[in-house]
Amino acid sequence: MIMLPSHRILESSRLNLNNSQGCLKGPYQLLWASVCGLMLVFSVAASDLPRALVGLKRSQNLMTMKVKQGTLFFDNGDEVKLWGVNFQPCLSSEFKMMKKRGLYQPFDKRAYFEAIEASLDEIEILGADIIRFHISQADITDGQGRLVENLWLETLDYLCAATVERGIYLSLALLNDYGWSVKDSYARQYKKQHHLFLPEAQQASETYIRELLNRKNPYDQNRPYKKNPAWVIVEPMNEPMFFDRDQMRSNYPGIETRYQGWLAERRLKDQQDHFIQFRKQNTMAFIGRMQNIFKTETCSQVMSWSLNWPRFRVWTGDDPFQATLETDCDLFSFCLYPGQSETPKDYRKEALDLSQKSFDDYLKTVIEDPMYHGWMLEDRFKGKAARIVYEFESWSNQNSTLYPRMAQLFRSLGAQVATMWTYRMKDFAPLFSGTHNMNLLTTPRKAASFMIAKEIFYGLRRYSSFHLDPVVQLEHGQSTIEWAKDLSTFSNDTCLIHTGPLKDRNLILTERAQHIIGYGASPFVNYEGNGLYLLSSGLSEDGQLHLPTLFGHSAAILHFFPGASFNVPHYSRSNKNRDEIAVHLEREQAYSFAYSHVKDQRRAMSYFSASRPHDKKVKVKAGTLILR
């Protein structure tokens, strides 16, 4: 933490907050300084994010899920609504990108796991309810599909246990074509396309999946994976891949042989409708085999089958969609990457900045055209299957309005879970630029828009009408989405989140105000820095910190995230040099901060309109303080 020069170390047990309704607990030293007559209490910790800021949940809050009549329900009867991220430190391919930049070298497992914990802290601050992990079977299996004890399996163990500890739900995608760290893994021989058609690939995968389900996790009290209370969704395969007849003949001779045998058994000719029938039957058989695995293993997880990206139906035809419906699978997933189709194929060398492009028309097409994602609103799907978003991202785009608009679209399509791709680890984020780029510190405005998008996702009914109006009315509040101004907000009488300056906005916060998360100034806060700040009146449910409300009393906890600015284009992956920093984080720069400690909106507005001195004004750096 950055600290003011005049300070005195205090033991946490000696801190007296007098009128506050609790105290800061935990392994944190505290220091204080008197600045302009204002008591500042700083949290000193190894991480940028003190644990006091993390709204810790507990595993007893975790519930199982089930699908009834096309809707996901928790076991207490509530409809499921979960918003979160993908996070991939258990993939060797992700680690190799970090290794090339000199991170974690020489390798220190403890340091790597500590970085994972710090990144999970950030993910919690963002408000994620669920995390999706990809597993590469090529990282953790041998030639027969048996598990191999190595770093990637241990990292997966650690991550799965961490979700339980933090009370965050977990989704696992089991079959992928990422990473190849085990040289003799069966996955080196069989790609995803093979799994739908070749019994030998399916048998090896079944061996792997059953071993994983029954693996006793040493980081989770030796509890088998399948009994992990956080793990609620299982995807047997990430993005199933299909091929046409010509591709099969050219690239998949083993499958071509099976196809010819299938035709011979049925005395059929080799023609397109028969090929489609062959593909559909095999898809249904694979889905059924996966369902049988989870059923016979008495798993509580809900199985989801992926129907991929917009226009997938154009490229494959309808048979993968109909195959899903004709099985017992009652949950499917889809993805959305606005801008991906407009990017050159070799986007790493020919990257484009799409932040200045409006995707409003594209989003309308996505929901209206059945060849994009409009098929989800067909009667055959709407009443039969629940749906989730396995990945979404604003491709090469740092505009702070696209996440909120996508959240609105997802609810209109009936989605109940959504996870963005992919959250960048704490140490890697300052070194990264490219197409999939979101981190709490290095992309602050995008991070704030992620939090706003969650409020929209939670505040809209499923299948609500999709519109592009600048104001979105929610169950408990409202959001504004203004692409031309690169600005989105969420507000109600207890919370304000905004992605840019709001001085001229008519926002109302009452004495019950609890949280302000912002970038730039608002009618309640004047801040010059280019990082997020979080002003909150009480943060944990288990007694870590309880302070009075912001405007009714005189205490609040305040955290300043470092200012962030790109040194290279945010969309470019050209920064390959080990020492090149993509994002500069301003940890030493001090900025003026002032907030209006008031009981009504009129007085708050008068502070800004008349440029009168503010109640609380200090020079601040990145860190945490308590205002009293």
Image (cartoon, rainbow, N blue to C red):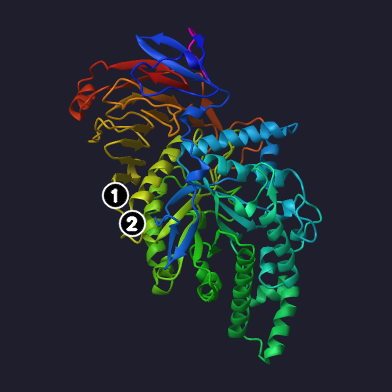
Task: Please tell me whether the stretch drawn in magenta is mainly helix, strand or loop.
Answer: loop
Secondary-structure class at tag 2: loop
Q: Picture coordinates of residue 90 (x, y %)?
A: 66, 45
| Label 1–label 2 contact, CB within 8 A | yes
Binning the other alpha carbons within 10 Å of mark 1 as few (below 14), some (14 to 19) or many (20 upward) gives few
In the picture, measured across the screen, residue 112 lies left or right of residue 391, that is right
The relative height of residue 285 versus residue 353 in the rendered view (above or below) is below
Q: Residue at x 43, y 31 (%)?
A: 532
Q: Picture coordinates of residue 194 (x, y %)?
A: 70, 68
Q: Residue at x 66, y 30 (%)?
A: 579
Q: Is residue 237 magenta?
A: no
Binning the other alpha carbons within 10 Å of mark 2 as few (below 14), some (14 to 19) or many (20 upward) gives some
Q: Amino acid at mark 2?
A: Arg
Residue, far bottom: 267
- Label 1 and label 2: CA atoms lie apart by 8 Å
Is residue 103 in view?
A: no
| Range of magenta residues | 1-7
Is residue 548 in view?
A: yes
Question: Which disc number belongs to residue 475?
Answer: 1
Secondary-structure class at tag 1: loop
The relative height of residue 324 versus residue 586 in the rendered view (above or below) is below
Q: Picture coordinates of residue 326 (x, y %)?
A: 52, 76
Q: Amino acid at mark 1?
A: Glu
User: What is the quadrant of residue 526 in the picture?
Assistant: top left
Pick whichever, 584 or 352, lies toward us: 584
Pick whichever, 271 or 606, lies toward us: 606
The quarter in which the C terminus is drawn is top left
Circle 2 sits on which residue?
A: 461
